[in-house]
Image: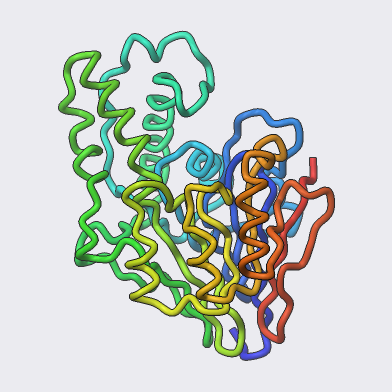
């Protein structure tokens, strides 16, 4: 990539979910894929990429194991060759199907059926990547996981959580899935994994000299999240934030952002969920001077445009 190449970041409106596409020269990186579950208005990442003449994905990245982030990656991997995948669990074996997972088709992730279906979809994603010969790297659950995903010219995409020493608990829950025997134990492990995975969501930062960093915060939120640790280990000053957990109030308090003077705040969520965040967003705006831009807004917006970086908040296309 030449020094004048513009890096563009697109935060797609996938309804209730998250999907970010980084275009760095010829390199295409996708962080989370949204969900393929029906929504009145949403952008289909497969159609979006095809509409721009993109024929391959270099980096397929998942922050954590929730359906509104993971399900769409399976659809992308079915349609595009993938150069590399960065997934939290390079291996996963589902338990036997619990009785309460029968009968519902494409269930909500918070239900027992939805939690089980997510696990099988993730297993299918791993199998598809293995069949295609796509290398799969982990996300900080072992000392061998490199935090730098790629460097293109002066730009770097790196992981800042988890890193070795962070001691996440979800890998042990994933390992416990195939060992669970009773219906009660299977449902308990599935539910605990679903409840815990947000707090251990991976966090990535795109850095380019002379431009604000872009923080892709996944759903890193709630009890057990590590924002103070992340803020102490890496420079977050003046960044553009794709807010954790769709901008919900269980993310860091407004004072956390105020101390780091953000350039822009972006929430990826369905319009129907925006009301529950209203007072928190007002506090964020008052403390930081940044309004919260959302993918649910009716028109695309540019969150940042510099000499080498553009960040766009895209509206639904269908």
Residue 223 seen: yes
**Who's the residue at 77% across and 46% down the image?**
316
| Residue 246, above or below 289 | above
Quarter of the picture holding the C terminus? top right
* Left or right of 296 in this view: 2: left
Whole-percent x and y of residue 114? 45, 24
Quarter occupied by residue 265: bottom right
Q: Position of residue 208 (x, y in %)?
A: 55, 83
Q: Is residue 60 visible?
A: no
Q: How many marks?
A: 0
**x then y, percent, for residue 145:** 27, 65
**Place of residue 100 in the rendered image (x, y in percent of width and height, measured from the top left):** 37, 11
Q: How is the image coloured?
A: rainbow
> Looking at the image, is 201 positioned above or below residue 275?
below
At 39% across and 52% down in the image, what residue appears?
201
Is 68 on the left or on the right of 298, as rendered?
Answer: left
Look at the image and tell me in which quarter the N terminus lies.
Answer: bottom right
Viewed as shown, does residue 195 lie left or right of 4? left
């Amino acid at each position: 990539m030449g020094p004048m190449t513009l890096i563009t970041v697109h935060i797609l409106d996938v309804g209730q979910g998250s999907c970010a596409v980084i275009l760095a020269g010829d390199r295409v990186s996708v962080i989370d894929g949204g969900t393929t579950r029906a929504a009145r208005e949403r952008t289909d990442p497969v159609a979006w990429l095809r509409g721009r003449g993109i024929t391959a994905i270099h980096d397929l990245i998942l922050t954590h194991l929730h359906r509104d982030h993971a399900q769409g990656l399976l659809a992308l991997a079915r349609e595009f060759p993938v150069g590399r995948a960065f997934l939290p669990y390079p291996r996963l074996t589902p338990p036997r199907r619990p009785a309460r997972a029968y009968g519902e088709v494409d269930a909500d992730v918070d239900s027992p059926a939805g939690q089980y279906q997510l696990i099988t979809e993730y297993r299918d994603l791993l199998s598809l990547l293995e069949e295609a010969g796509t290398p799969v790297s982990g996300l900080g659950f072992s000392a061998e996981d490199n935090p730098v995903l790629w460097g293109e010219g002066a730009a770097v995409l790196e992981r800042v959580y988890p890193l070795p020493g962070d001691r996440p608990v979800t890998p042990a829950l994933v390992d416990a899935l195939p060992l669970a025997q009773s219906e009660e134990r299977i449902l308990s492990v599935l539910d605990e994994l679903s409840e815990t995975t947000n707090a251990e969501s991976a966090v990535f930062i795109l850095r380019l000299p002379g431009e604000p960093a872009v923080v892709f915060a996944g759903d890193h939120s709630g009890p057990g999240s590590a924002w103070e640790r992340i803020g102490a280990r890496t420079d977050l000053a003046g960044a553009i934030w794709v807010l954790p957990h769709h901008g919900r109030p269980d993310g860091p308090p407004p004072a956390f952002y105020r101390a780091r003077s953000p350039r822009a705040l972006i929430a990826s969520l369905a319009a129907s969920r925006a009301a529950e965040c209203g007072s928190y967003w007002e506090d964020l705006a008052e403390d930081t001077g940044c309004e919260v831009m959302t993918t649910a807004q009716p028109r695309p917006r540019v969150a940042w445009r510099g000499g080498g970086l553009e960040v766009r908040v895209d509206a639904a296309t269908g």
